[in-house]
Amino acid sequence: MPRIFHGKKYHDLKAGRFRLYFRRKYRLISLSNDLLIGFFFITGSILNFFTATASFGSIAYLLGSIFLASRPILKIIHNTGLKDDYKETPR
């Protein structure tokens, strides 16, 4: 049965000889992704005010939506690690 341990900076789930680590702190890449989301949506809003730049506004909205969709994926990737306990135990 997997056991969950709580540390100061992470939670780990022990299942057999492996531990799956979930880090708690936010990363710079997550914050920069959030800034890019805001930038693309604000740019898209401004460009949609004018008919000549409406297509560029749609592209900015599309980029903002892609970055917004990638946000949870980035958080999962950067806050998860896998460790083999079998290699670390002395024999």
Image: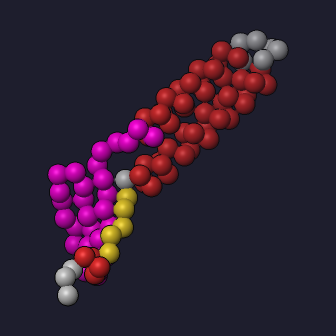
In the rendered structure, does residue 50 fall within the stretch colored magenta? no
Q: Position of residue 90 (x, y in %)?
A: 19, 82
Name the residue: 24% across, 55% down: 10
In the rendered structure, does residue 6 fall within the stretch colored magenta? yes
* Up/down of 8 relative to 1, above or below: above
The reply to whether residue 74 is in sight is yes
> Which segment is the magenta one?
1-29
Q: Position of residue 8 (x, y in %)?
A: 17, 51
Name the residue: 45% across, 40% down: 29
Image-based side of 38 in relation to 51, left or right = left
Determine which quarter of the picture holds residue 83: bottom left
Image-based side of 17 in relation to 62, left or right = left
Image-based side of 38 in relation to 88, left or right = right
Q: Position of residue 52 (x, y in %)?
A: 82, 14
Name the residue: 22% across, 51% down: 9
Residue furthest top in the image: 50
Image-based side of 16 in relation to 40, left or right = left
- Considering the image in quadrants, where does the N terminus appear? bottom left
